[in-house]
Amino acid sequence: MEALLCRKLGDPTVSLEDNDSPIVLSKNHPIPQLDSPTAVRVRIKATSLNFANYLQILGKYQEKPSLPFIPGSDFSGYVDAVGPKVSNFRVGDPVCSFAGLGTFAQFIVVDESQLFGVPQGVDLVAAGALAVAFGTSHVALVHRAQLTSGQVLLVLGAAGGVGLAAVQIGKACGAIVIAVARGAEKVQLLKSLGVDHVVDLGNENVTESVKKFLQTRRLKGVDVLYDPVGGKLTKESLRLLKWGANILIIGFASGEIPVIPVNIALVKNWTVHGLYWGSYKIHRPGVLEDSVKELLSWLARGLISIHISHSYPPSEGFYYCCNRRKYFFF
């Protein structure tokens, strides 16, 4: 089978044709075999590139797999083979899921307990980009912050993968959603998703823009801060939080880890949630299962949508995606 293989740690934006590329396209990689009676082999239709995959290849992610490895996290496809004790799936069924590694390939083997059936009418490519980005935002907002209707949600990095998921989940929960992004194209995309207020970092100050919006709506402040960015933007956003607010720490795409003053958190009764979504698979797998099931239901009902900007074959996907900062699919 074809697979993108990480043979060494390094910059994945280097072209596959360059000898310095840490990624090679293996065209004769062994097809994984069923390894248990309840194992299922899936022929992958689509897989998305998440920021965590990029960090893994750089060697900067929390988990550092042994070399060589096949990157990739979420996927969708069709059941290709099943073990003798598999009861929930048959060959040909459309499925989706997520894995620690291995989705940047034509086949993957997982236990049937880790698979989700894709509902009728749901686009299989869209399902292949659901689990990680939308799962992260769903667990953060619904499970951790317990976002409710009428609350004010501020999403930083709102035009990124988890950001787009967060604003849609916020709207699905009935929240008043404020999104922060940069550039007219991203602003228009966010407005098309029904965001209540968008701050364009290219020509607006976050504090001033959000305060003006809050005053217009006669709102006291932000209830939930969703932060995958970090850096100076975090510090600026803290000024907008009301008493009892929830802060969701998703990541540090800016490259700078912010400092949250705990004395102010104490006085204002803020709750700071660190969210490492992948660790739920070990510690609270039931939460992940319920989350993905609800997201698939929302996707089927049209409450959320997956924004796919580009699709690429594996021979050029990682290189082009990293340079354009877009999703890619097999």
Image (cartoon, grey):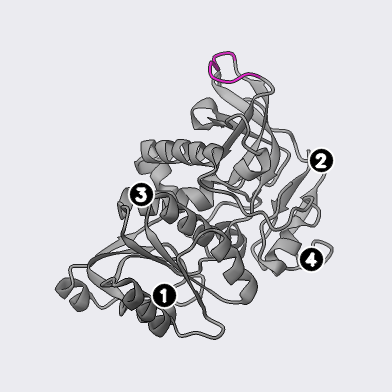
Residue at image mark 4: 15
x and y percent of residue 124 in the render?
A: 66, 38
N-term-proximal mark, 3 vs 2: 2
Residue at image mark 3: 142
Disc 2 packing (10 Å; few <14; some 14–19; many ≥20): few
x and y percent of residue 250 in the render?
A: 42, 62
N-term-proximal mark, 4 vs 2: 4
CB of mark 4 within 8 Å of CB of mark 1? no
For label 3, the SS is helix
Amino acid identity at mark 3: Val
x and y percent of residue 199 in the render?
A: 49, 76
Residue 25 magenta-drawn?
A: no
Name the side, left or right, on which 66 lies relative to 260: right
Q: CA distance from mark 3 to mark 1?
A: 25 Å
N-term-proximal mark, 4 vs 1: 4
Of residue 176 and residue 285, the one placed in the foreground of this image is: 176
Q: Nearer the viewer, mark 3 or mark 1?
A: 3
N-term-proximal mark, 3 vs 4: 4
For label 4, the SS is loop
